[in-house]
């Protein structure tokens, strides 16, 4: 058996042979006339007129039988079979192919179409050329299922060998497209806001910090686009949305990744109740287009996205699963109760955030079907409008024990907003690292007047993991961040 390095060296020699024959092993152009999918769709017509076609793709299998060689090759649309016959292309050309081409190479094939006795659609090769010489052999057996980290590190191989994995990313792309179309059709304008920000805000999270050398300026990677999107409401736009990357310097688990894709939209003159109805309509429309159904399997549960979704009060959930009556306890009593229940309370957390930690451990995991958890404690979301002195005009969409959407009627009173953000600064100073920071420029923008509005935020990765029945965000992020692979001395691998 040959080692990978021996095979690589052998292929480099083949590359030199190709180059010495006067052909580039990596030519600039190809004269492709059809995608394979087009050939399959128009096969009978192309055979009837005996039209010569030029196809391209990666060689996946080679089967030689004396003077005949069959190979399967595929482009990005489908797979096809080619027949190399020595008497059709000449002995020298035939032998050159056998001696210098390998599985994994990209090839251009010219020829006419026919059907074999076994009714396999095939191209009879009359000419060919190399498009890209591969130097490393494709694995005979992709062990990605056994070594999950290897699948993430070498996603390119995972996509080559796993149709299921490839399909997940097609679903992801289609979902984002349909989501974008749905919002555009409903009058929303897509915009872009800064990723590098002087002050991070719009969410409860720890940021990544970096430095702009040209300006000698410390900046943060955004944790949310919220505060800039609201500035656009001040500026006269009524419906805006953004789909883009956000960054939070937090733990990594099946529902969290340091960089992730977020959609946020803001809707002037709407409230959180209208937003719940709109959310139901959005899921129904988008999922029917992307998946053909609103009933999907996720982790052994059938999730029904049809709507209307159940609506449950945050305080009712807390009392149901922990017997805690939020309004009857002060902050210190609630903290003691949380400790008794074995809940880890972040340093500096105030009463609303302590309640949230209890809810996340004891209540949220009980919710399987899509459910709007409404009216979080006043003070929990410093950017949300209060419904009364105890509750926010807010909701979270929870599915299978995970928060998918966070939304609320937006606070547009600049005096109250300024006071709330100053209180958040006190929390931050007391050690609560996830507290929101004060942004005086944002508060000043509010003083020019922001219309009443509803705001919506959803993690794209999280919802895609659910609709594709994936156990982790890393399954549906093409290239998730990974630790450096430990260097180990190994004897050369044989294949």
Image (cartoon, grey):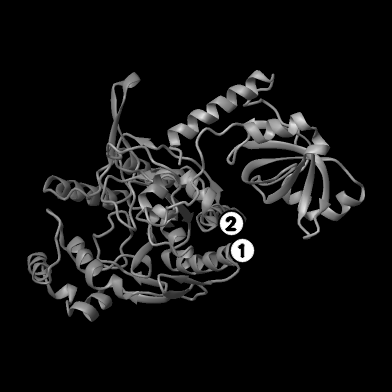
User: In the image, which disc is placed on residue 289?
Assistant: 1
Q: Give the residue at x 37% y 53%.
A: 148
Horizontally, residue 55 falls left or right of residue 489, namely right
Q: Give the residue at x 83% y 51%.
A: 114
Tag 2 or tag 1, which sits nearer the N-term? 2
The image position of residue 299, as x and y in percent, is 40, 70
Q: 9 above or below 112?
A: above
Horizontally, residue 290 falls left or right of residue 211, namely right
Q: 244 above or below 127?
A: below
Pick whichever, 215 or 20, lies toward us: 20
Mark 1–mark 2 Cα distance, whole angstroms, equals: 7 Å
Q: Is residue 240 visible?
A: no
The image position of residue 126, as x and y in percent, is 81, 37
Mark 1 near mark 2, Cβ–Cβ under 8 Å? yes
Q: Residues within 10 Å of mark 1 (few under 14, many from 20)?
A: some
Q: Give the residue at x 27% y 76%.
A: 317
Horizontally, residue 161 falls left or right of residue 352, namely right
Pick whichever, 246 or 38, lies toward us: 38
The image position of residue 122, as x and y in percent, is 77, 50
User: In the image, which disc is placed on residue 178?
Assistant: 2
User: In the image, which disc is placed on residue 32?
Assistant: none
Pick whichever, 139 or 42, lies toward us: 139
Q: Residues within 10 Å of mark 2 (few under 14, many from 20)?
A: some
Q: 193 above or below 342?
A: above
Q: Give the residue at x 68% y 22%.
A: 23
| Element type at mark 2 | helix
């Amino acid at each position: 058996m040959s080692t990978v390095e021996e095979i690589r060296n052998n292929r480099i020699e083949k590359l030199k042979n190709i180059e010495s024959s006067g052909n580039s092993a990596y030519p600039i152009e190809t004269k492709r006339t059809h995608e394979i999918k087009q050939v399959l769709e128009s096969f009978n017509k192309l055979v009837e007129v005996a039209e010569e076609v030029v196809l391209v793709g990666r060689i996946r299998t080679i089967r030689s039988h004396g003077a005949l060689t069959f190979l399967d090759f595929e482009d990005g649309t489908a797979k096809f079979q080619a027949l190399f016959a020595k008497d059709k292309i000449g002995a020298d050309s035939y032998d050159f192919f056998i001696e210098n081409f390998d599985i994994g190479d990209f090839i251009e094939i010219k020829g006419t179409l026919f059907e074999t006795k076994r009714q396999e659609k095939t191209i009879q090769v009359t000419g060919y050329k190399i498009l890209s010489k591969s130097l490393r052999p494709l694995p005979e057996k992709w062990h990605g299922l056994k070594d999950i980290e290897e699948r993430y590190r070498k996603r390119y191989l995972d996509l080559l060998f796993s149709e299921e994995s490839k399909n997940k990313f097609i679903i992801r792309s289609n979902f984002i497209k349909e989501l974008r179309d749905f919002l555009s059709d409903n009058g929303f304008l897509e915009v872009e806001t800064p990723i590098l920000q002087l002050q991070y805000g719009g969410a409860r999270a720890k940021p990544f910090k970096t430095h702009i050398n040209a300006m000698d300026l410390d900046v943060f990677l955004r944790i949310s686009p919220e505060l800039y999107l609201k500035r656009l409401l001040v500026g006269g736009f009524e419906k805006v949305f953004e789909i883009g990357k956000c960054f939070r310097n937090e733990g990594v688990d099946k529902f969290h990744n340091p960089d992730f894709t977020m959609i946020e939209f803001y809707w002037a003159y709407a409230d959180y109740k209208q937003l719940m109805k709109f959310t139901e309509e959005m899921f129904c429309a988008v999922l029917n287009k992307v998946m053909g159904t609103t009933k999907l399997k996720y982790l052994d549960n059938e999730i029904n996205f049809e709507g209307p979704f159940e609506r449950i009060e945050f305080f009712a959930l807390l009392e149901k699963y922990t017997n805690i009556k939020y309004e009857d306890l002060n902050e210190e009593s609630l903290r003691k109760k949380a400790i008794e229940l074995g809940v880890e309370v972040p340093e500096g957390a105030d009463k609303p955030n302590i309640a949230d930690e209890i809810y996340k451990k004891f209540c949220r995991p009980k919710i399987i079907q899509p459910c709007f958890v409404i009216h979080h404690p006043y003070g929990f979301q410093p950017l949300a409008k209060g419904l009364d002195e105890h509750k926010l005009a807010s909701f979270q969409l929870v599915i299978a024990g995970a928060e998918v959407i966070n939304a609320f009627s937006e606070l547009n009173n600049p005096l109250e907003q300024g006071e709330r953000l100053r209180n958040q600064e006190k929390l931050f100073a007391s050690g609560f690292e996830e507290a929101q920071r004060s942004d005086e420029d944002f508060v000043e923008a509010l003083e020019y007047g922001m219309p009443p509005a509803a705001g919506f935020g959803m993690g794209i990765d999280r919802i895609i993991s659910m609709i594709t029945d994936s156990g982790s965000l890393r399954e549906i992020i093409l290239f998730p961040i990974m630790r450096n692979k430990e260097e180990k001395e190994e004897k050369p691998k044989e294949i």
